[in-house]
Amino acid sequence: MAALNLNDDLLETAKRYAVTRALSVDAAVALLINLGLERVSDQSRAASLRPAESPAIRFIDGFGEFVAPPGTPVLSTDELLRIEDEY
């Protein structure tokens, strides 16, 4: 078995995660690493299967219209104003 050095904050997070799942800290860290690797693998696989997309602007009667990639969430005016206020 190999030793692993973690920052104090990561170690505390791993310990809390382990307690909530009734796992040892070692098992919790291994589980979290595997979950992260699965997520990266799934994202890489999905990215490799879809064609490369880039935002585009199309012009209709001289006005530019931004064409967002499929699946882009739509923001309501209220959400946009809230975000604008945050910055």
Image (cartoon, grey):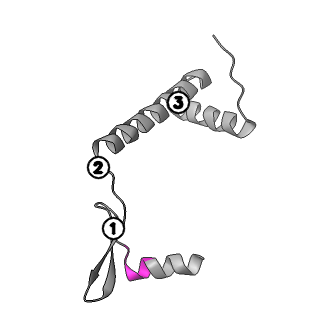
| Residue at (63% x, 32% y) in the render | 15
Q: CA distance from mark 2 to mark 3?
A: 29 Å
Callout in the foreground (3, 1): 1
Element marked by disc 2: loop
Q: CA distance from mark 3 to mark 1?
A: 33 Å
Question: Quick one: quadrant of the C terminus?
Answer: bottom right
Q: Are marks 1 and 2 in contact (CB under 8 Å)?
A: no
Q: Which residue is mark 3?
A: 33
Instruction: Work out whether mark 2 precedes mark 3 in sequence or the reverse, and give the earlier one.
Output: 3
| Residue at (39% x, 39% y) in the render | 44
Q: Which residue is mark 2?
A: 51
Instruction: Work out whether mark 3 precedes mark 1 in sequence or the reverse, and give the earlier one.
Output: 3
* Secondary structure, magenta segment, majority class: helix
- Where residue 38 appears, as percent x and y from the top left, is 42, 32
Near mark 1 (Cα within 10 A), the count class, few <14, some 14-19 or many ≥20, is: some
Relative to 87, say whether 51 is above or below.
above
Left or right of 6 on screen, residue 41: left
| Residue at (70% x, 31% y) in the render | 6
Callout in the foreground (1, 2): 2
Which amino acid type corresponds to the residue marked 3 in the rendered image? Ile
Residue 24, picture quadrant: top right
Element marked by disc 1: loop
Relative to 82, say whether 13 is above or below.
above
Left or right of 58 on screen, residue 27: right
| Residue at (61% x, 25% y) in the render | 25
Left or right of 24 on screen, residue 60: left
Residue most toward the left? 61
Relative to 41, say whether 23 is above or below.
above
Q: Which residue is mark 1?
A: 68
Residue extent of the magenta highlight? 75-79
Which amino acid type corresponds to the residue marked 2 in the rendered image? Pro
